[in-house]
Every structure is written in C-alpha cells, then in structure tokens.
Amino acid sequence: MAEFALIDRFRQRALTRSDVALGIGDDAALLDPPKGQSVVLAVDTLVEGVHFPKGVPASAIGWKALAVNLSDLAAMGATPAAALMALTLPDDNMAFVDEIGAGFSALADTHRVALIGGDTTRGPLSISVTVVGYVPRGAALLRSGARPGDDIWVTGTLGDAAGALALWKSGTPMLRTGALRERLDRPAPRLGAGHALRGKASACIDVSDGFLSDLGHILAASGVGADVEIDILPASSALVAAIEDPHARRLLQLTGGDDYELCFTAPRKRRDAIQLALDAVATPATRVGSITEGARLRLIDADGLQVPTPERRGYVHFADGGA
Amino acid sequence: MAEFALIDRFRQRALTRSDVALGIGDDAALLDPPKGQSVVLAVDTLVEGVHFPKGVPASAIGWKALAVNLSDLAAMGATPAAALMALTLPDDNMAFVDEIGAGFSALADTHRVALIGGDTTRGPLSISVTVVGYVPRGAALLRSGARPGDDIWVTGTLGDAAGALALWKSGTPMLRTGALRERLDRPAPRLGAGHALRGKASACIDVSDGFLSDLGHILAASGVGADVEIDILPASSALVAAIEDPHARRLLQLTGGDDYELCFTAPRKRRDAIQLALDAVATPATRVGSITEGARLRLIDADGLQVPTPERRGYVHFADGGA
C-alpha cells in the first residue's frame, strides 16, 4: 500500500487557508482557530455494503463521506474549516482513489474545507472523515434547547434518499430514480441554513437517521414532547411522482434516513425572522408541528386526529435490507 | 446496531475537562482551546488482519488505536486533550466493545484525554481514532528542521514490536514473547519526551513505520542526509534474548515498525540540555548518528565502514506476511 503516494495525491488537491498552519505531510496538522470561536468536531464513517452498495460511483463515496460530516456541523450552526480522512481500501486502484478524491474535493472546495490530514490503510472499503469547524463561543445550536410552544421546522424535503433506496431495492432502473438518487448519493449539507439559524433556533439536529428518530433526539435532550402534522411534511415532486402510495411515501418521510435536512425548533415569535434568514440563504423550510409539555411524540393528520407512530422510527440501513 | 447505546457506554467513561464545552451526545463536540495554542490533529486507523491479527485482546485494540495517535502528537511536542473514535464492528458483542473501551480508557485517563465524539457502524472490524491536542503557536516540532551537523537521537529501544511479530509468526508460544508482545500490543506514546523536546529538538518524528523509513521522512522534509551508527542502535534485553542472530536483530531495529519511539535531531551544543530534559521525564535516549549535507542515508558499523541499507526500509504490516 503506497500510503505516502496516496496522501500526496490528496495533498495536491487540498486548498490552503490562513488558519491552517500545517497541513498534510507531518505527524499531525496544526490549526489556529480564530479568536472567540469554539472548535467543533464530528466524525462519521461510511462502510461499503452498509452505507452504500457496491457499485456506487467512487466520486459519490468521497462526496458523501464529507457531506454527512458537514451536515453535523450545519446542525451546530458551525462553519467548516478542515477535514481529516481515514481511507481503507482493498487494493491500490489509483483511478478509484482519484475518483474518491474528486468527489470529496468538489464538496470541500464549495465550502472552503481544507484536507489537513489522513491515513490510508489496506482493508475492506470504508471511509471515515473527521471535520473541524468553528462557531462563536456560546452560539452553537444544541439539541437540548426546545421549549413547549416552540414551532418545529424542517428544511427542504423529506424521504427522497430513502425513496431512491426503496426504488433501487425494488429493481427500478437507475435512470428513473434520477433526482432522488442524487439526494442519496450527493446530499447537500445545509451549512447556510445552520449558520442563519444561530441565535434564532432553540434546538437543531440534522436528519440523518430519519425524521422521527432525529426529532426524538431533540425531545429527549430537551425533556419535551411534540405534535407533528404529518400531512404538511414536505415532499419533493420527484418523490410524489416516484412513490404513488401516500402511506408508503409518508413512511419514507417519517423514517427514511440520509436526508441531511435540518430539523429545528424556535419560539413562535421568531417565525418571521427565521423565514427571512432562511430566504436569504435560499433554503426552503416548513413548520411541521409544535413542541409540547411531557415526553410524547404524537402524529396528527389533516383532520386533527392522532395516527399511530411507525414501529420503527429510524433509518433502515442499506445492510438491514439484506446485504 | 445499537449505535446510541454504544456511544452511551463510552460516554459514561469519558473524563471531563474544562476545555471540553460539549462532549458526546450532540451532532458534534465543542472544544475551547487555551489562548495562544495551535490545535494539533491526527488520525490513524487499525484494521483487523492488517494492523493486528484476529484474536488480539480487545483491550489491546482499544489501547493501541489511541496510542498510535498520541504518538503522532508526541512527535509534534503537543499535549493531548481529546479524541474521537470511529468504530466499525461486525456484530453487537457488547463484552467486546466494553473491552475495547476499557483499553482505550486506560490510556486516555493516563494522559487526560477526553473522548468527545464517536461513530459506531456495522462492518469488518476496524477502529479509527482522531486525536486533538495543543501546542503553543510556533513551538511544534516538525520534520523539516534537521540541519547538517545535528545529532540524531532515538528514545527507548528499537525493534521490540517487530521482534514480537517475528516470534509470533515463527510459532513461538505467546508466553515466551512477554515483554516484546507488550510493546506490540500496548505501546507507550512518548508524550513526556515530546513535550520536553520543544525548543530543543530541530526535527522530530515518531517511529511507526520503521526507524530507517521514518528517519527518511525527516531527511526528505529537511533536505539533508544522515550517517547512522548501526552498532549503537538501542536494543532491549528482551530483544537480545529473543533474537539471537545479530543480523536479524539489526534488521528488526532498522526496519521494524510499531516502536512508537521518537526519532529526533538537535544541534550538538544542546546535548546536555536534551539529556537533562529527557532524564526529567524518565525517558532514555541514545545518539545514533548525525545529519549530513546531501541526501544520502549511510549506515556505518563499529569499524567506521559503510554497510548496505536494507532493501525495504519500512514496516512490514501484519497483512504483508500472508494474512
């Protein structure tokens, strides 16, 4: 395994930043955070056969490995700065590595993320990315700030990635899953929205495991309950066209993973401010319910009637389906 | 995969630090570095069947995954603060996970490292750790500062871990490899020495791939050559007892990996200062050669004669031996 050659390949692509005192090439990297900022850190791993099926384009693997981590920074209201990549590869396929690098860099460059370190090892294909960002001290969006009476919001649309996975599993040709598949392979982290919500949202999380599951984390951390109006959960036109059965579609929206939207809460009096702030970063958002006292999560239909919550709130990994 | 239960298990063990504003349990962790310090970051992955054979105690896996990263911080002269762990596991064996956690914590607690984040995924066994430390701005030990005339030093002894691996591969019962095996399974990162060398060493690297390979990185980064006196390379009494053939032993010292000693350079006039500083942290060190002009790495025997360098300078991974 030509570890040093691999790291050099990535180094050539890595952008430079004034806060990166030392990037790839020594025993460790050096970062000088701006004054008054907390350093924000998250790590996530994608494993072949678990988080993505064999045969996914390598560029999508590189993109997504960074995207899922940037989404965590977005949920904190943080601004990304740097990343470290631990790449485990079964062989020395340099074209494959370059494709991973191209996908990673395409997203990294968009958000000015410098690749400052890495490790390449031989083994079953997986990619683990650690991201580093900044947020002004005390300004991070946490899961624990939701209060009874707060609105519950979600950005963008829910269920697209899970829809693509469902279609793929049912044997639908890739071409017909186009827009949905793009959501699954190349999720766009909501960094602009997370930044815009600082000082406005009372709690925030990214929707990675499934809307109900992730909202559940806010409720647990905040010690509150929620009423969710399931008929106003946002769906893309692609999802509506692809999944005709409304019950199946709703289940994807409620429990499908990999959306990488933000679910957040905010006091009612901030509705206009939030709408303005999200408009300014061109991020659509929908109010989908409200925080309640107690700890119950209730689903309410258009007639105001409570409907049962799905047995499984969370993400069905690729592997859980039988891989 | 009970990801949240796993993370909770680790969270309960994680020590608290005043600079950790937010640890495990949200989308990301928050760290407030002390004023005037650079943030130092490194990542390393251990894969079963590559970096350790099947059947190694889980506690040793947890220990070593942190140790190899702390060794990178030591080589920078940095003080560790926090770590993130991405753990990929084939199943939900909680006893195994707890053992990994116990090994990790044993080392983490010794060096006051807080586990601030993690990700657990299903897949072939591997563990990727990102460490975060601090070093005063401008004080980090780099690979690039070696100058002609500098002494070349190495801490501790070389070849023990590779000796354990060689014995293990030749079928020697585990009990006979005791002290060597401990070096392989539970390396002790030279954090005290790294700290003591700040402002004294001109260049530094940790010996992870093999002495010649790692010294080679200093030479390349500094644009210099070296004369190494192979007959004074430090060997442990355990290695001398276990590997009787002096040629075989020397090869292990020169090219065996996993030592996690520090190899550093320093001006001759600092010999006494270095000896005093390392004595103060109870770290033995040996002067093994000197930096030269040019780019050649020469090996010199006790008679002052040049001997050929081994064809392979670097670490022979477990997997390279046939796994």
Image: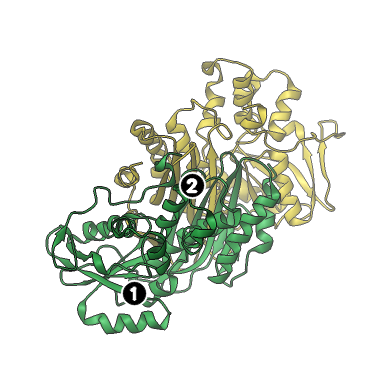
Chain colours: A green, B yellow
Subunit that carries the residue with mark 1? A
Amino acid type of the residue that numbered disc 2 sits on in the rendered structure: Val
Residue at image coords 82%, 32%: B301
Q: Image point 44% across, 35% down: which residue?
A: B90
Percent coordinates x, y for residue A255 in the rendering:
31, 55
Q: Residues within 10 Å of mark 1 (few under 14, many from 20)?
A: many
B83 relative position to B313: left or right: left
Left/right placement of residue A143 relative to residue A97 reads: left
Residue A268 position within the rendered picture, expressed as x and y whole percent measured from the top left: 20, 78
* Residue named by callout 2: B129
Q: Position of residue A28 (x, y in %)?
A: 58, 54
* Residue at which label 1 appears: A285
Residue B142 in sight in this render: no
Q: Is residue B283 above or below residue A41?
A: above
Question: A91 above or below A259?
Answer: above
Respond whether the residues carrying marks 1 and 2 are from the same subunit.
Answer: no
